[in-house]
Image: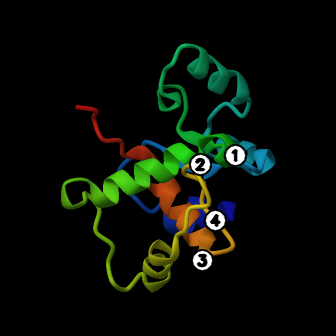
Amino acid sequence: MLSIILDDLYIRKFKKKINNIFIDGANPSFIRALKIEIGENEEYEPLVERARKMKSDVSNYMQVIPVNFSSEHKAMLGNCKMLLEKDGGYIAVNPRFDKLITSLRTAVGQNEGVLDKEATSYDDVFDAFRLALAFYKLQEE
């Protein structure tokens, strides 16, 4: 996976600097390996805690940003819904991404903003989509 991220898809392929890589926080050893590969401090937990205490965006402190689905899932789901629906939507999905479209169409909430993963087709694709949208936030009016 490191090889795919570093060589084939992202970091070395693109000429422009990538600002942030949002990654599922469930695998700290992979996060550390990726951080080491790109020259970022692998000890990220104190930086995450500092950002939380200062009510600051963690992207101010690091490029590889672990996202904890257990605590962020509701906010990520709300952000996704907002970007897809507010004012006619800010995100368009290319029809060739049929699994993502199926996932979005079958996404079912259990209660109060919690996704029912068993009822949602391709829930991993949906999670990847939510991570991809983590960078985009609508300004509150």
Count the marks.
4
Q: Which residue is mark 2?
A: 73
Precedes in sequence: disc 4 or disc 1: 1
State yes or no: discs 1 and 3 in contact (Cβ < 8 Å): no
Disc 4 marks a residue whose amino acid type is Asp
Precedes in sequence: disc 4 or disc 3: 4
Disc 1 marks a residue whose amino acid type is Ser
State yes or no: discs 1 and 2 in contact (Cβ < 8 Å): yes
Image coords of residue 9 (percent x, y): 50, 67
Q: Residue at x 75, y 51 (%)?
A: 30
Crowd rating for badge 1 (residues with CA inside 10 Å; few <14, some 14–19, many 20+): few
Q: Which residue is mark 4?
A: 116
Disc 3 marks a residue whose amino acid type is Tyr
Please give the label number shown on residue 122: 3
- The reply, left or right, for residue 82 in relation to residue 78 is left
The quadrant the N terminus occupies is bottom right
CA distance for labels 1 and 2? 6 Å
> Taking 105 as reference, is 58 above or below it?
above
Residue 32, picture quadrant:
top right
Please give the label number shown on residue 127: none
Disc 2 marks a residue whose amino acid type is His
- Eye-nearest disc, 2 or 4: 4
- In the image shown, does 36 or 26 lie closer to the viewer? 26
